[in-house]
Amino acid sequence: MDEDFVRPFDERGVTVGGDFEVAEPELHHDESYLGLVRDLAAASMNVVQGRGATVCAVLRGGPEEFWVGLAPHNQLAHRYALRISRVDGAGRTRRYHDVLWLLRDGESRRGHDRSWFEGLPVVGWLHGAPVRDSGDFPELPRLEMVQDSLRTTLLSLAGEPAPLPAEHAPRLAGFSWFDSESVRVYVTTPAEGAVLGVDLDLPAGTEVGPPVGTAAIPDLMRRLADGVPVEWRSREHRAPDEFCDRLFDLRRDTTEPTRSS
């Protein structure tokens, strides 16, 4: 790994430097979070049935939280994100159904009282989208979701989620769909000891969500199995974003280094 991309660790084990705060190396072994990425990638379609809110990003904002972006009615111009703590008030690690409930709850609140929702403090920015803390929502009785119809539908279409890749293999660590023609995918790989961001073209005609489940992702993983390919060096951005250590632009229609967003 180039020295330009090595940054010191703070007391939480998170690399820091300049304006960047980068996911800690343990991200590769954080199977509860990586499992959420896997499941929420499949949910890159209607989160609230009938409302058309698309999951457009899943990223770990820090060791104890993750950010999930939503695009109401599949409109990227109206994206927002929720900051969600990895454990709930009872100290339990949040799972897929917990997160799905929070996303539905947030989109329902936004739809019913837009001025209240948009008046909540902005706690960060996810590629230009405001991030609000789900912990700022008032306490309400939790919905019973023993049999979640959305998850059942997704799994009936895609089958049960595949197990995570082996620890020695690259793993999908997040994605962000903030451009109508491309998606940024995040991968952890032991060969690099880093979080890599990669910009990829969306397939022609993509209308709902990023192509996280397409053949492009397994191919990307295979290419990274032995480290960053030499031919990628000319496609490396001069500076990564705040969610990765290195950033590459593999889109076909660009000749300049990937834009920072």
Image: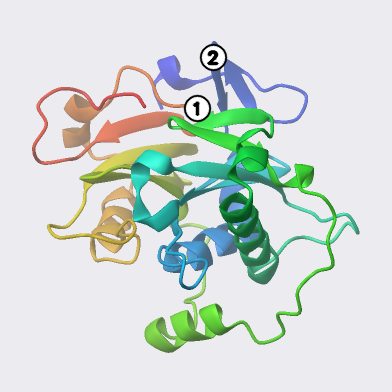
How many other residues sit within 10 Å of disc 1, few (<14), some (14-19) or many (≥20)?
some
Residue 192 visible in the displayed image? no
Left-right relation of 176 to 135: left
The quarter of the rendered structure image containing the N terminus is top left
Q: Which residue is mark 1?
A: 242
Amino acid tagged 1 = Glu
Q: Which residue bears the numbered disc 2?
A: 19
Query: What whole-number distance in Å separates the C-alpha atoms at marks 2 and 1?
Result: 8 Å
Q: Going 62% across and 38% down the picture, which residue do you hit?
A: 115
Residue furthest out toward the right: 90
Q: Amino acid at mark 2?
A: Asp
Rendered residue at 36%/55% (across/down): 74
CB under 8 Å between discs 2 and 1? yes
Q: Position of residue 93 (x, y in %)?
A: 77, 60
Residue 128 is situated, as x and y percent measured from the top left of the image, at 43, 29
Is the residue 247 above or below the residue 143 in the image? above
Q: Is residue 73 above or below residue 66?
A: below
**For numbered disc 1, what is the local secondary structure?**
loop
Q: Secondary structure at mark 2?
A: loop
Q: Residue shown at 42%/64% (left/top)?
A: 52
